[in-house]
């Protein structure tokens, strides 16, 4: 064997430099520590806390520096628990300005990240947070909230610190920072774990105080401090240290691999122990010594966190104090005993004798003695068990004696009959025997005796009270409570049964969950108490629902991890406990059971088929159909709950279409896990799911009328819709016929079915024809019935227009052998229908309105005005319709031409590649050759060459459609906005749809595609500026002929026209550059910049100022683009 000096470090045996050096292990079983001890503790019960927890620490002198290893930040979930609620609270405080600023900034950062501009994305995130914080300072009202400037400044600092920590957390997600700056990443990780527990506990307390008041704020702070201390201060291994270091140190993790050092751990301990105490002193300084209860608060706020700290030391929390396990155990025992005595005495003063004195049946001073014996003895026994001190024969006898004494003392305190006092003593004895010997019969004997004692206490104190609570008598409620307690006592014993009998614990847990859900639902939904004619509203606190829910979910997770319950029980229990949260949101008496049924129907793909990568965990096709059917039936069963939720949200009863739409959407969303996890490879399943969700959304948006024979009318729905409140509040509302919405829904669903290939219009020409005609008829009838209700002839023209549009678009996208010859005539018919429909609409409306004759002069004038307004509105609607039609045609032709050019490029590249690769064709796999042959044989007969030959009309048609769309939009701009200056910047990009053709636009190519946009913007602004100058001068005088030379109007016109001319050079140079993209003299655009300054500073016309600003932008853009082209050319050379 080689000597140790020549062996690799990974094969050297580890020898601790100190006999007392403790060891940690990441295993969760007690046996993993050798002697059953947790890290730094000889207690046999301890265990590690997971792969991310601290698993050891050798002395610093015995280790070398750990290596940095870039990897993903592994503590995201732990940090999210603290910072995500804090971020939500800050957004609520900041309001809409903060949300808008942050959303915009993060969108920019996301775009930069998608463009692989990592540094820009990183700085974008930080800039977003910085601007959001500035917006927060201006939008929040901290000074008015606190009524104190120092407190407002302190709150603002806390918010800014939390915002900074969110930025630090986001920075750790960038891998390039880890690679380029490893030391900074380690510092950021340590900073995050150091500051998050302090800032998060303060913000959580702030939010809780805002909701429930300031009385017990220090206790809230204490609770949050304990939670975040456990999450962050228990030693954790850094995400960025090499995991192989463990094997180099004999299974121990070096201290350098820990996130927090001794200083940070000490700060956390001081914050845990002293901060709630000091906060209570500062907020209640005037009453802290006013009573024994107030003094007890001080001791409790100090010693309860101290006790928690001692318990956390069993997980290594005090590793920075000493590494000697025996010293740590001594610290825990001595300080824990003192703290326990203080806490018990203070709880007696603060809680027991303050709130439960009427249940204590022993006169003083024996009541103080017996209550102290009961509470202190019980706490001492629990502490000894938690620290693993009950391990030998003597400690077992002492624990048994303590359990007997505590049980007897507690029974005497509550007034248990003297003749039955042996029963609680025997119950304590059996409990101690179960704890020390793990005897199952002893536990069930304890359960029986304990249940008898609970039953006696309930019947003795509450059974005969004539109180109605939560809609039932107190006697019935006592029965439910006793059943719940008996089940809760029985379940721990059932967990120790052999694996064959584990179904008993599943039955017990499900029964207890059902009983708990029923009790809480009664309390929360029937929140009233009646006692001898005295009625008072009593609310079951929401936090109790949340607490019992998460406690139940944690218990289910623990039992599942220990393999005490099976996956089906986990599924049922998770759904039952989660459904209780619905009562916090929806005020319905049946919402808990409806939510449970929905969750039971939705969750099987997530809970019953967990392992996605095993074929045995995948659903079969028939299972998928069955689950989808069950989901649909469950949603239909819960329709009344959905109705109540919609009624609560809208404030009035929803329509049948809205209710049906929500049911369909909920069904589709509930089926998403089935398709995503188990049938992700089945394309028809995805397409059907999209259609189902789209159908539901359309029903929600359109709310079509449902026939009475098909609508569901239960007593609840009928009573809600027959309420007289709607008439008294909203009055009689004239109902508008909504049947055309069915046509729009059908058209959209047909489009989705065609896009997803559910309807195979791509391969069958006849089906394509029927589809396009049906689409056009449905859309035409819908538009006619919704917007043009005057003349049947106009309806026919609109239907024909929509049919032509549908046929043109469908056959342009999926051409047939003869479609290229017919589509130009279809487009010509469409263009011809535009003026005919436009003119006919006005004539028909005038005839219909004025056809009854004239009654009087005033009525005639009113009718004429009404007619003119109606004609203008209808013609504007027609213009909008035809603008949308021409836009759609232009987009479709642009898309088809781009696809054609791409296919030509691919074909040309394929021919060139096939010519160059003929010599290597022998090595081409035969399977690939057969696949290519099959694809070639299945290709459509309408080839690219034939499209180029017979579809030469497409560019010209696309250009005509683009120009007509742009012209109609300009007319709409004049009619609707009076010729807005800003509109041209949104309308000019329409001209990007222009194509190169030989008929209208010769020499126009892809290089010149931006030229129409820029030249139209410049030309439009120049022409409208001249028109506005002429209009101002004309309205100020009798006309241009009476303009006085040297007068104010003459000076106004000449000055502004001259300033307008000064803006021309920049626009002309830039438009010439956009057309040619040839490099020009760099000095020319820069020399043209000063000419725009007088136009900005001196002019009286806003459009000239816009032209001047635009000229400066054009000149700078031309210079930068030319400079970039020059640099790119140098790089190429």
Image (cartoon, helix red, strand yellow):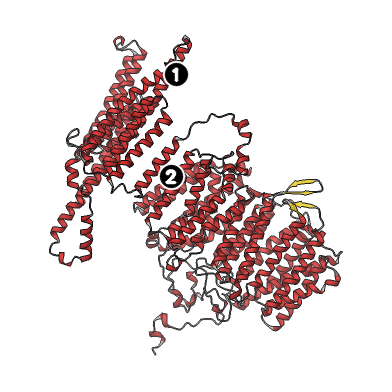
From where the camera sits, is residue 810 visible? yes
Q: Residues within 10 Å of mark 2 (few under 14, many from 20)?
A: some
Q: Is residue 119 left or right of residue 956?
A: right
- Quarter of the picture containing the N terminus is bottom left
Q: Who is closer to the viewer here, 379 or 425?
A: 425
Report, in whole angstroms, how far the alpha carbon at label 2 lies from the one at label 1: 45 Å
Q: Residue 490's x, y, as percent? A: 68, 69
Q: Who is closer to the viewer here, 845 or 257?
A: 845
Q: Is residue 950 left or right of residue 142?
A: left
Figure check: 214 above or below 446:
above
Number of numbered discs visible in the structure rendering: 2
Q: Is residue 573 left or right of residue 690?
A: right
Q: Who is closer to the viewer here, 263 or 828?
A: 828
From where the camera sits, is residue 1070 visible? no
Judge depth for marks 2 and 1 and give the one in front: 1
SS at badge 2: helix
Q: Residue 458's x, y, as percent? A: 78, 62
SS at badge 1: helix
Q: Residues within 10 Å of mark 1 (few under 14, many from 20)?
A: some
Residue beneath disc 1 = 866
For residue 104, which numbered disc appears in the image?
2
The residue positioned farthest toward the front in the image shown: 709
- Mark 2 or mark 1, earlier in chain: 2
């Amino acid at each position: 064997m080689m000597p140790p000096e020549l062996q690799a470090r990974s094969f050297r045996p580890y020898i601790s430099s100190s006999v007392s050096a403790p060891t940690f292990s990441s295993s969760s079983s007690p046996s993993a520590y050798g002697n059953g001890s947790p890290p730094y503790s000889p207690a046999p019960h301890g265990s590690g806390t997971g792969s991310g927890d601290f698993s050891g620490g050798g002395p610093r002198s015995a280790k070398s520096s750990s290596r940095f290893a870039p990897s993903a930040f592994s503590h995201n979930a732990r940090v999210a628990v603290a910072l995500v609620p804090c971020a939500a609270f800050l957004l609520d405080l900041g309001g809409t300005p903060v949300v808008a600023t942050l959303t915009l900034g993060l969108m920019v950062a996301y775009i930069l990240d998608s463009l692989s501009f990592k540094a820009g994305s990183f700085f974008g995130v930080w800039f977003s947070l910085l601007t959001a914080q500035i917006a927060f300072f201006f939008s929040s009202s901290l000074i008015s909230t606190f009524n104190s400037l120092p407190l407002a400044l302190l709150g603002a600092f806390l918010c800014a610190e939390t915002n900074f920590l969110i930025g630090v957390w986001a920075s750790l997600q960038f891998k390039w920072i880890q690679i380029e700056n490893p030391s900074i990443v380690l510092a950021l990780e340590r900073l995050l774990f150091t500051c998050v527990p302090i800032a998060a506990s303060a913000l959580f307390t702030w939010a809780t105080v805002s909701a429930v008041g300031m009385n017990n704020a220090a206790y809230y702070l204490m609770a949050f401090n304990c939670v975040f201390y456990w999450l962050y201060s228990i030693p954790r291994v850094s995400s960025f240290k090499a995991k192989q270091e463990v094997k180099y140190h004999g299974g121990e993790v070096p201290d350098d691999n820990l996130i927090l050092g001794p200083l940070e751990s000490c700060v956390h301990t001081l914050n845990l122990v002293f901060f709630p105490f000091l906060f209570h002193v500062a907020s209640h300084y005037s009453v802290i010594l006013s009573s024994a209860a107030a003094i007890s608060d001080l001791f409790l706020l100090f010693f309860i966190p101290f006790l928690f700290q001692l318990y956390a030391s069993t997980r290594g929390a005090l590793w920075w104090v000493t590494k000697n396990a025996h010293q740590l155990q001594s610290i825990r025992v001595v300080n824990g005993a003192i703290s326990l005595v203080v806490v018990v005495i203070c709880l007696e003063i603060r809680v027991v004798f303050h709130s439960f004195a009427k249940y204590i049946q022993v006169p003083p001073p024996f009541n103080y003695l017996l209550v102290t014996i009961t509470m202190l003895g019980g706490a001492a026994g629990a502490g000894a068990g938690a620290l693993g001190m009950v391990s030998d024969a003597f400690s077992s006898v002492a624990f048994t004696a303590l359990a007997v004494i505590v049980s007897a003392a507690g029974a005497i305190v509550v007034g248990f009959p003297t003749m039955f006092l042996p029963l609680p003593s025997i119950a304590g004895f059996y409990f101690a025997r179960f704890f020390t010997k793990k005897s199952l019969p002893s536990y069930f004997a304890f359960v029986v005796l304990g249940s008898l004692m609970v039953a006696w206490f309930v019947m003795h104190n509450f059974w005969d009270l004539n109180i109605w609570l939560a809609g039932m008598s107190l006697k019935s409620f006592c029965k439910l409570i006793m059943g719940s307690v008996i089940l809760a006592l029985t379940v721990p014993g059932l967990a120790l049964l052999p694996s064959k009998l584990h179904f008993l614990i599943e039955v017990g847990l499900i029964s207890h969950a059902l009983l708990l859900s029923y009790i809480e639902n009664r309390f929360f939904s029937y929140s009233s108490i009646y006692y001898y004619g005295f009625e008072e509203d009593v609310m079951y606190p929401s936090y109790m629902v949340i607490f019992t829910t998460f406690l139940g979910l944690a218990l289910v997770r623990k039992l599942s991890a220990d393999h005490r319950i099976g996956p089906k029980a986990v599924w049922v229990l998770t759904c039952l406990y989660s459904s209780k949260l619905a009562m916090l949101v929806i005020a319905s008496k049946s919402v808990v059971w409806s939510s449970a049924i929905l969750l039971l129907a939705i969750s099987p793909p997530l809970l019953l088929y967990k392992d996605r990568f095993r074929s045995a965990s995948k659903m079969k096709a028939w299972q998928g159909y069955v689950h989808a059917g069950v989901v649909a039936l469950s949603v239909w069963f819960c329709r009344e709950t959905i109705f109540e939720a919609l009624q609560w949200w809208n404030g009035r009863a929803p329509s049948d279409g809205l209710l049906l739409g929500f049911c369909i959407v909920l069904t589709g969303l509930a089926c998403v896990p089935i398709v995503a996890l188990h049938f992700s490879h089945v394309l028809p399943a995805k397409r059907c799911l999209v259609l189902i969700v789209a159908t539901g959304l359309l029903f929600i948006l359109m709310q079509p009328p449902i026939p009475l024979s098909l609508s569901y009318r239960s007593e609840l729905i009928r009573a809600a819709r027959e309420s007289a409140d709607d008439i008294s509040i909203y009055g009689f509302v004239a109902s508008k016929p909504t049947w055309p919405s069915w046509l729009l829904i059908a058209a959209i669903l047909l489009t989705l079915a065609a896009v997803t290939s559910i309807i195979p219009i791509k391969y069958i020409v006849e089906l394509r024809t029927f589809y396009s005609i049906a689409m056009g008829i449905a859309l035409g009838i819908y538009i006619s019935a919704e917007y043009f209700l005057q003349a049947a002839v106009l309806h026919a023209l609109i239907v024909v227009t929509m049919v032509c549009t549908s046929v043109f678009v469908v056959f342009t996208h999926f051409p047939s052998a003869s479609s290229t010859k017919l589509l130009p005539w279809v487009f010509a018919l469409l263009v011809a229908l535009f003026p005919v429909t436009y003119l006919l609409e006005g004539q028909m409306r005038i005839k219909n309105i004025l056809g009854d004759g004239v009654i009087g002069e005033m009525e005639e004038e009113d009718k004429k005005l009404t007619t003119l307004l109606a004609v203008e509105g209808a013609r504007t609607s027609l213009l909008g319709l035809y603008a949308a039609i021409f836009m759609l045609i232009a987009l479709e032709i642009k898309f088809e031409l781009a696809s054609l050019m791409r296919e030509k490029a691919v074909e040309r590249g394929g021919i060139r590649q096939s010519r160059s690769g003929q010599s290597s064709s022998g090595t081409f796999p035969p399977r690939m050759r057969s696949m290519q042959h099959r694809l070639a044989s299945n290709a459509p007969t309408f080839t690219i060459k034939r499209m180029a030959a017979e579809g030469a009309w497409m560019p010209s048609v696309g250009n005509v459609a683009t120009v007509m769309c742009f012209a109609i939009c300009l007319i709409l701009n004049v009619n609707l906005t009076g010729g807005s200056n800003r509109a041209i910047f949104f309308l000019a990009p329409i001209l990007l749809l222009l194509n190169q053709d030989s008929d209208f636009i010769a020499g126009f190519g892809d290089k010149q595609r931006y030229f129409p946009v820029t030249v139209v913007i410049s030309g439009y602004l120049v022409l409208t500026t001249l028109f506005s100058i002429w209009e101002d001068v004309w309205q100020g005088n009798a006309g241009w002929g009476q303009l006085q030379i040297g007068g104010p109007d003459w000076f106004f016109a000449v000055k502004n026209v001259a300033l307008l001319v000064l803006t021309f050079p920049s626009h002309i140079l830039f438009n010439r550059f956009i057309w040619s993209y040839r490099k020009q003299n760099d000095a020319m655009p820069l020399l043209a910049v000063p000419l725009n300054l007088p136009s900005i500073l001196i002019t009286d016309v806003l459009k000239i100022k816009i032209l001047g600003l635009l000229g400066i932008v054009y000149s700078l853009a031309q210079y930068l683009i030319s400079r970039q082209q020059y640099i790119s050319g140098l790089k190429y050379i």
